[in-house]
Image (cartoon, rainbow, N blue to C red):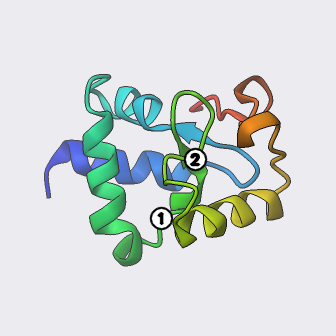
Amino acid sequence: MQDFTLKIIQTIVAIPAGRVATYGQIAAIAGNHRAARQVSRVLHTCTSKYQLPWHRVIGAAGKISIPKDHTAYLRQKKKLEQEGIEFGLSDTIDLSLYQWSGQ
């Protein structure tokens, strides 16, 4: 496994319950601010193996990146709500309240 992939995994695991992080934020913390798509790939391929809290990773606009008509969208929203995260208009998460600082 590449160092960068391992850093992505470690960063995702570190996101505490009740907080979210963006794909780009995770990429930057892991060492490459331009690798948001790599974060998505790692989530897709490694979530089960490493028990990643995939639901805590969202888009930079404060929205779930999965299309609303997909069952995984509702599953992610429900998991976040169970952790106390509230959704505003257009199912947006207020990043000023819920975004993890990365520390």
Quarter where residue 28 is shown: top left
Q: Where is residue 85 in the image (x, y as percent from the top left)?
A: 81, 48
Q: Where is residue 42 in the image (x, y as percent from the top left)?
A: 29, 56
Is residue 66 placed above or below 29 in the rendered structure?
below
The residue type indicated by label 2 comes to Ile
Quarter where residue 99 is shown: top right
- Quarter holding the N terminus? bottom left
Q: For this view, does 85 lie left or right of residue 43?
A: right
Q: How crowded is mark 2: few (under 14 residues within 10 Å), some or many (20 or more)?
A: many
Q: Position of residue 4 (x, y in %)?
A: 22, 42
- Quarter holding the C terminus? top right
Identify residue for label 2.
64
- Per the image, label 1 sits on a secondary structure element best described as loop
Residue furthest left as drawn: 2
- The residue located at (37%, 54%) in the rendering is 9
Is residue 57 placed above or below 27 in the rendered structure?
below
Q: For this view, does 14 lie left or right of residue 4?
A: right
- The residue located at (40%, 68%) in the rendering is 47
Identify residue for label 1.
52
Q: For this view, does 35 lie left or right of residue 59?
A: left
The residues tagged by marks 2 and 1 sit, at their Cα atoms, a distance apart of 16 Å
